[in-house]
Image (spheres, rainbow, N blue to C red):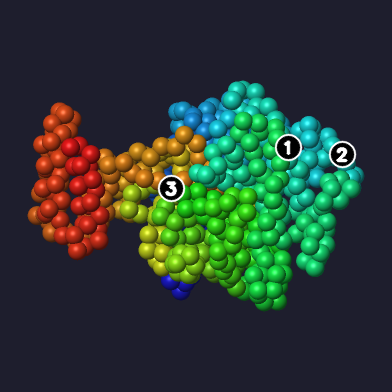
Amino acid sequence: MQESRRARRRAGLRGFAVIAAGVILAGLLPTATAAAEPAPTQADPRVGLGAGWHDAQQAASGLKLVGHQDRPEGFYQPDNPGNLAFANSDLAFSGNYAFVGNFHGFNIYDVSTPSQPVLKTSVVCPGGQGDMSVYGNLLFMSVEETRGRLDCGTQGAPGTVNPERFRGVRIFDVSDIAQPVQVAAVQTCRGSHTHSVVTSKNDTENVYVYVSGTAGVRNGQELAGCVNAPATDPNTALWRIEVIKVPLAAPRNAAIVSQPRVFTDPETGAINGLQNTRPAPTHPSGGNWSPQPVTSACHDLTAFPALDLVAGACAGNGILLDTSDPASPVRLDEVSDPNFAYWHSATLSNDGKKVVFTDEWGGGTGARCRDTDEPSWGANAIFDIVDGKMEFRSYYKMPAVQTTTENCVAHNGSLVPVPGRDIMVQGWYQGGVSAFDFTDSANPKEIAFFDRGPISATQLFTGGIWSAYYYNGHVYGSEIARGLDVFELTPTKDLAKAEIAAAATVTYEQFNAQHQPQVTHAPSFEVVRAYQAQAERARTMKKGIAVAVDKLIDSAERMADRRLNKVAAIELRTAAKLLRTSDPAQAAFAKALNDLARELN
């Protein structure tokens, strides 16, 4: 797989169009660039795209950009589009609203018409990262930078110790979308780089927030209990996560209730029990490790409440946690990888039997999708979960060569709820959006993409898709430097119109990618048609059988439209009997037919 991928990357580079230099000048507002036409033999249309801030060239397959909103006034620097102090970050969703985090605060968009997102509210509240989660009427926001203030002020918080400084998790009441109100601010020793909502069916009165702090430990005089010490000190603020308990009836009383040592060696009791040294003096590329794959904190934790499970990406390790008691998570397994520079985030398959970890080699600001970069560097690693243990299966990396002025590496994504398949859509910073199928975990395959040219042809400005998440029929992208993108999936040979329609039958009242819901597809004709498309793609049905089955489904749908449900059910069961259930694709198709027949009866 790696050899063929490398060959494709080299072929793409040979076809790379030369972009006219000097069109985008450092420190000036970017304008359109003149770009040569792609070479006729170019392997990938993403290679050679012209640069521009708001007018870069675009390439797409299976994803159509249908809506966009630039960052609003006050949330960008005109002469420096990549200024991280104003960068868009993570997304959360509730009803008709998308919450877009930003290092300068957050913005709320009405996406009731996805192709026309409308800015409803902007909240200035600097502090860095700005990751968002929503639960009920509560909005959670990560803050880690020392400039963060309790009052959301823009004047910063100078000095080593400042009583007005805030680093941790802010909690807003957003019952009035137009006027979010901060109701709590929970301080933590290392701030909150990210956080994850964790729920328990045994505790419906509270929600828990797992905090991943990766910044330096603050002064103990500023926040009591913050100790910057080696692992031999049992009070050190390193080698732990923080758990915030939020009473839903009184969120103002939110507080840290535990600080689990999830990296402890069970045999020795050492709290720094996972990867504490680099796996080699240098990264496999020959360069310095960036960041350092040393496990003293988790970067991101993804909760899967249906199985009381959390998958953690923790710098030098990927871990699994049992969260049956959400205040006291217990580590189940851990893995490491000599190719991974920094375990960044995690996504579980819908059945909880696979997990995709990302490697943020370069920290998100480096160009890591060059022709010289192997497909196992800055990529996804896909594991099967077998008897509670993770077993490596393969790597997946967005396959198109990117330039040295495009920060590009694996980043945040979520599942697309196509029945019968494991499909993930994912942001790759200036590598754009890539959707891939990992149903066969050993052989992942890209099935859709969208990409823009670099912000600049001559200078690396930090930008691109921070997060790409599927929500209620559309894919939303938080573009660091450009704003909010909205995409539609479009049919290709790898993703049928029926599968897209079946995914769209899944709707969420709220969605946080790091509080991952388990999807159950209700029986429907859309779901039947999706499995039909998959069985036909497998090419295991005889042509005559495929035609007969299709006619029976058509007739059943007409009968159901006329409320002749019993007749429709008979036709569906008849279609199911024509299928060969020894074949996996036909068996899944037959089950969908019988499930719908029972529903209609």
Residue that label 2 marks? 163
User: Mark 2 and mark 3: span between their CA atoms?
Assistant: 42 Å
Cβ–Cβ under 8 Å for marks 1 and 2: no
What residue appears at the point 15 percent right and 51 percent down from the top-left corner? Answer: 576
> Label 1 sits on what residue type?
Ala
User: Mark 1 and mark 2: span between their CA atoms?
Assistant: 13 Å
Image coordinates for residue 441, horizontal then vertical, percent: 41, 64
Residue 284, by quadrant, is: bottom right
Label 3 sits on a secondary structure element that is loop
Label 2 sits on a secondary structure element that is loop
Query: Where 378 falls versus 140 (above or below)?
Result: below
Q: Is residue 89 visible?
A: no
Image coordinates for residue 208, horizontal then vertical, percent: 61, 44
Residue that label 3 marks? 518
Q: Of the residues under marks 2 and 3, which one precedes in the sequence?
A: 2
Query: Label 2: how many residues lie within 10 Å, few (<14), some (14-19) or many (20+)?
Result: few
Image coordinates for residue 177, horizontal then vertical, percent: 59, 25
Q: Which quadrant, please, contains the N terminus?
A: bottom left
In the drawing, what numbered circle is on residue 339?
A: none
| Number of numbered markers | 3
Q: Of the residues under marks 1 and 2, which one precedes in the sequence?
A: 2
Residue that label 1 marks? 185
Task: Depth check: give the residue in front, 244 or 544.
Answer: 244
> Label 3 sits on what residue type?
Gln
Residue 528, by quadrant, is: top left
> Label 2 sits on what residue type?
Pro
In the drawing, does residue 587 fall left or right of residue 83?
left
What residue appears at the point 89 percent right and 45 percent down from the top-left corner? Answer: 161
Q: Which quadrant, please, contains the C terminus?
A: top left
In the drawing, does residue 560 fall left or right of residue 420?
left
